[in-house]
Amino acid sequence: MTELRQALGAVERAVNEENRKGGEARQIVVGVARLVDIDLTRDPAEGNVWSLSNMSRVLTGVHGLARRVRELEGRQVVDFAAITAQIDELETQMQELESDQFAGYRQKVQDLSRRQAGLQEALAILFQQSKESSK
């Protein structure tokens, strides 16, 4: 009987140790599930959060994440400094074009202003003359 109790005690200790390790492993699975946005408690496969098919959802999520990482690694890295330099260069060119374009407009405006002043002066003279002739 003593041998039987010793054997049962050894089996109980082994089962408890396996349960402890299983609990630790489940915590790792839950942590990884959170990283890949999977809630193992939502609609668990076979109605059991810890079923193999339910925990396999985590593996599927990790595979999807790995695939996405490979896709992103294949893309060209954006060189923000080069883009900023191109934008600055384009802005400078636009300012030069605007100043060249507006230089012609400014000259036209000045010419029109002189003509307008001349016409206003002529109008004032004509008005004065008509006023004097009507006396």
Image: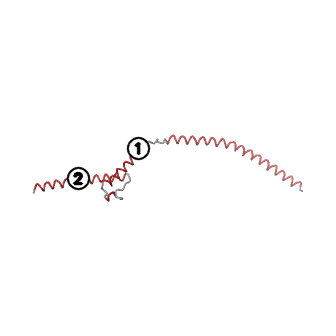
Give the vertical position of 1 relative to 112 (above or below).
below
Residue 1, picture quadrant: bottom left
**Sequence-wise first label, 2 or 1:** 2
Q: Is residue 106 left or right of residue 6?
A: right
Give the vertical position of 128 relative to 97 (above or below).
below
| Amino acid marked by disc 1 | Arg
Q: Is residue 6 left or right of residue 68?
A: left
Q: Is residue 80 left or right of residue 57?
A: right
- Confirm or deny contact between disc 2 and disc 1 (CB under 8 A): no
Residue occupying the point 84% across, 51% down:
126
Residue 54 tag number: none
Q: Which residue is mark 2?
A: 18
Residue 104, picture quadrant: top right
Q: Residues within 10 Å of mark 2 (few under 14, many from 20)?
A: few
Please provide percent x and percent y for residue 135: 89, 56
Please tell me which residue lies in front, 28 or 117. Answer: 28
Please tell me which residue lies in front, 123 or 102. Answer: 102
Residue occupying the point 82% across, 49% down:
122
Please tell me which residue lies in front, 76 or 107. Answer: 76
SS assignment at label 2:
helix
SS assignment at label 1:
helix
Q: Residue furthest left?
A: 1
Residue 70 tag number: 1
| Amino acid marked by disc 2 | Glu
Please provide percent x and percent y for residue 120: 79, 50
Please provide percent x and percent y for residue 47: 32, 59
Colour mode of the rendering: secondary structure
Give the vertical position of 75 relative to 32 (above or below).
above
Please provide percent x and percent y for residue 55: 32, 53
Q: Residues within 10 Å of mark 1 (few under 14, many from 20)?
A: few
- Mark 2 to mark 1 CA distance (whole Å): 37 Å
